[in-house]
Image (cartoon, rainbow, N blue to C red):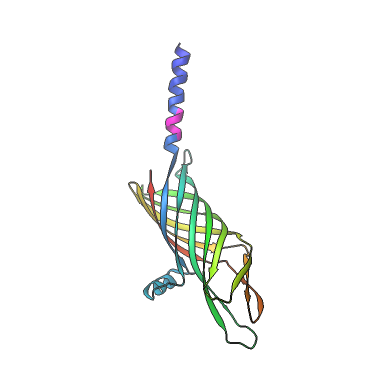
Amino acid sequence: MKKAVLMIFLFIGVVQLAQSQIQGGIKAGINYNSDSFSDVKNDALSGAKSKTGFHAGAWLRINLPVTDLYLRPELVYTQLSNEVSYEPAGFTAKTTTYDFQKIDIPVLVGFKFLKVAHVFGGPSFQYILDSDFNIEDLKQVDSDGFSVGVQFGAGIELGKLGFDVRWERALSDTEATFVDSNVGNVNFDTRVNQIILGLSYRF
């Protein structure tokens, strides 16, 4: 009987510990296709219509025992705009904007300090779902959709609400091909560097 009671209390303790170590929630925010925060400021003041997007998704935070470190995997849908410039032989140079949608899976390691602040970094695995050009004579015909990047950032958490700022750098080559009626196939790199502003809610 004593062993049974002990096992019950031990089980309850393990469940409570697991619940305290794992948290989760939802997130959303704005993405800027940019290499620096100063570029983001200039783009935002000018409207930034061709270089902005948004994201939404879910996250988990697994607190690592005995440390202030945590592991934070995320599953995020992102839509972003970008530009491609190219010059067909004998024709005027062209610039086309295109929107693309992707799934991002960041796997971040973070450090908590001052009770409300944290910094983090880690790889981000990405898969391009679709992209659309805004010039009628262009048709996307092929895309290598998988790429790997890295994210670094910092944020604060006040109660159940959190806010963070991230810089994302693309690492792997990702190419897409579209057809121009004057030059045929045009290859271009779909990698983008981003500044990401995010708002999260913890359940």
Along the viewing direction, whichever of 115 and 94 lies nearer the viewer: 94
- Residue 97, given in percent of the width and then of the height, sits at 51, 73
Q: Residue placed farthest to the front in the image?
A: 136
Q: Residue placed farthest to the top in the image?
A: 1
Look at the image and tell me in which quarter the C terminus lies. Answer: top left
- Residue 193, given in percent of the width and then of the height, sits at 52, 66
Question: Which residue is pictured at 42% across the width and 36% down the height?
Answer: 20
Q: Is residue 94 above or below residue 12?
A: below
Total marks drawn?
0
Q: Is residue 45 above or below residue 123?
A: below
Question: Which residue is pictured at 57% across the width and 84% down the height?
Answer: 93
Q: Residue placed farthest to the right in the image?
A: 184
Quarter of image, res 196: bottom left
Look at the image and tell me in which quarter the N terminus lies. Answer: top left
Quarter of image, res 127: bottom right
Q: Main secondary structure of the magenta part?
A: helix
Query: Is 5 colored magenta in this rendering?
Result: no
Q: Residue placed farthest to the bottom in the image?
A: 90
Along the viewing direction, whichever of 125 and 153 lies nearer the viewer: 125
Question: Which residue is pictured at 36% across the width and 49% down the height?
Answer: 114
> Which residues make up the magenta segment?
14-18
Q: Is residue 136 above or below residue 76?
A: below
Q: Is residue 7 above or below residue 145?
A: above
- Residue 117, given in percent of the width and then of the height, sits at 38, 52
Query: Is 16 colored magenta in this rendering?
Result: yes
Along the viewing direction, whichever of 136 and 64 lies nearer the viewer: 136
- Residue 9, given in percent of the width and then of the height, sits at 43, 22
